Image (spheres, helix red, strand yellow):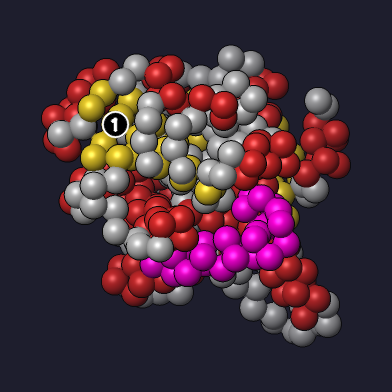
Amino acid sequence: MKVFDYMEKFGHEQIIYFYDKTTGLKGITAIHDTTLGPALGGTRLFNYNNEDEALFDVVRLSRGMTYKCAVGDCNCGGGKTVLLGDPSKVKSEGYLRAYGRYIQTLNGRFYTGEDMNISEKDVDYMMMETNFVNGRADMSGNPSPVTSYGVYWGIKACAKEKWGDDSLSGKVIAVQGVGAVGYTLCKYLHDEGAKLIITDINKARRDQTAKDFNATVVEPEEIYSVKCDIFSPCSVGAILNDKTIPQLKCEIVAGCANNVLLDENIHGDMLMNKDILYAPDYVINGGGVINVYQEFFPPYNHERTLKIIEKIYDRLLYIFAYAKKNNINTQLAANAYANERIKTIGSIRSNYIKNEKNL
């Protein structure tokens, strides 16, 4: 699919390619929708196979950020940057500062921060060149732990919806991916008495998680077919599709990963038809963006932020009820919820007010 085809299909405002000849920095920024406010979204550094794969990822991720901000009551739009390269080879002070200078050229239309393979230390270098960074170490910090916290509460909401009780004690939960977010989620689940089955392409990380939380380890390709109560995808996106959904032996899908469904209509309906409750990804994993959004309202308060993130529980229950009432899959119900908020706030801002606060 060509760039303008993507923009027309998903409703993007801008897709920007950029390059720095000194450091070899290469990336794509997608700004999806700024109706609610400036675009907000992390920066992902990944060794994509090709530019088409990177474009596909950034388009889906940025759209997801618009919805994530909308359902999380954040007055921001959605954006994302993907950087193309091997994280072990390309990162340097110059590389990250060059990226920061590029962000500064967008003049506040896009705020960014940590995501895959971008750390707090990396953000510190970016901040030397730009004012438009969130997730700063001296404020909200690493968003991974609070993302995990929100997913934990979201899983409890799914249990309440499915079984009438939100206790996870004794439940078998299969976790796909035990990186920064997945590992912390495993701790929350283990502490409540869940039995864990895990996988990860990183053997050392997988083995350490298994040791820490007494988890059973399976190979990556086996995780879809294990018998469990809850399947929790916490790795890459688009993993639920025509091939993997028929393998599932669970009652709930709820995890940290973005864009879990390859196709929202087809694969959302497939899960619904199998009577598998699906927690829409950008609703359940919205804790990270809710966390960094609080930096717009200093002083940042961690305890207050956690209370806001716990609202993911009630938000999911509302979306599940909406999906039932309208006989649609839960992903489409979440989209409707987000679109209604964007439409309403966009409408009340249609009249001109001098010095209007966009946040």
Q: Is residue 295 left or right of residue 196?
A: right
Residue at position x 65%, y 73% from top? 358
Q: Is residue 349 visible?
A: yes
Residue 66 x %, y %: 65, 55
**Up-down: is 144 above or below 301?**
above
Within the magenta stretch, is there residue 321?
A: yes
Residue sitting at the far bottom: 353
The structure residue drawn at horizontal position 44% and vertical position 65%, both measured from the top left corner, is 313
Q: Which residues are magenta?
A: 309-333
What residue is disc 1 on? Answer: 197
Q: Is residue 11 left or right of residue 267?
A: right
Q: Is residue 24 left or right of residue 192?
A: right
Residue closest to the eye, 96 or 213: 213
Q: Answer few, some or many: residues within 10 Å of disc 1's Cα (few below 14, many 20 plus, some between 14 and 19).
A: many
Most frequent secondary structure within the magenta stretch: helix
Query: Residue 64's x, y, as percent?
Result: 62, 48
Rendered location of residue 251, percent (x, y): 46, 43
Q: Amino acid at mark 1?
A: Ile
Q: Classify 56 as above or below 278.
A: above
Element on which disc 1 rests? strand
The foreground one among 75 and 137 is 75
Please name the residue shown 51% across and 20% down the image: 47
